[in-house]
Amino acid sequence: MIIDLTKGEIAELKKTAPADRRKGGFQSYIVELQNRMKGQSIDLSHNDLVKINRYASYTSGGYQTRLKKIFGRTLGKYLAGLLR
């Protein structure tokens, strides 16, 4: 599934510095998504949707808020975790 992100969504995605990749699974995944961006578009696989939903469903860590800002507009209706 290819989605186009707005400038604000891209800015939120890029808040995680590439050096933060070593800080944990979420940070590593966000940096991976940054690297897969082509212009304003990103191609998300089924596995990506599962990961995003899982991270968005966490109750602590702030992941759910960041993911909602990045993917809520485009994926909110597909991912239950982003609707909470």
Image (cartoon, rainbow, N blue to C red):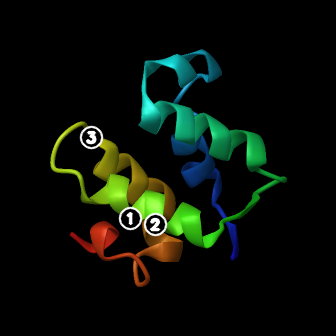
Q: Quadrant of residue 21?
A: top right
Horizontal side, residue 40 vs residue 26: left or right: right
Q: Amino acid at mark 1?
A: Asn
* Extreme residue in the right direction: 38
Q: Callout 1 environment at 10 Å: few (<14), some (14 to 19), or many (20+)?
A: many
Figure check: 65 above or below 60: below
Label 1: which secondary element: helix
Residue at image coords 51%, 43%: 12
Indicate which disc residue 62 carries: 3
Quarter of the image for the N terminus: give it: bottom right
Measured in 3D between alpha carbons, the distance from the residue under mark 2 to the one under mark 3, in whole angstroms, is 18 Å
Q: Quadrant of residue 78?
A: bottom left
Q: Point out residue 17 in the picture as x, y percentages from the top left corner.
A: 58, 22
Crowding near pointer 3: few (<14 within 10 Å), some, many (20+)?
Answer: few
- Between the residue at mark 3 and the residue at mark 1, the CA separation in whole angstroms equals 14 Å
SS under mark 3: loop
Q: Decide: marks 1, 2 in contact (CB < 8 A)?
A: yes
- Label 1, on which residue? 53
Q: Residue at point 24% right, 36% down?
A: 61
Q: Residue at x 46, y 58 (%)?
A: 51
Amino acid at dot 3: Gly
Secondary structure, mark 2, is: helix
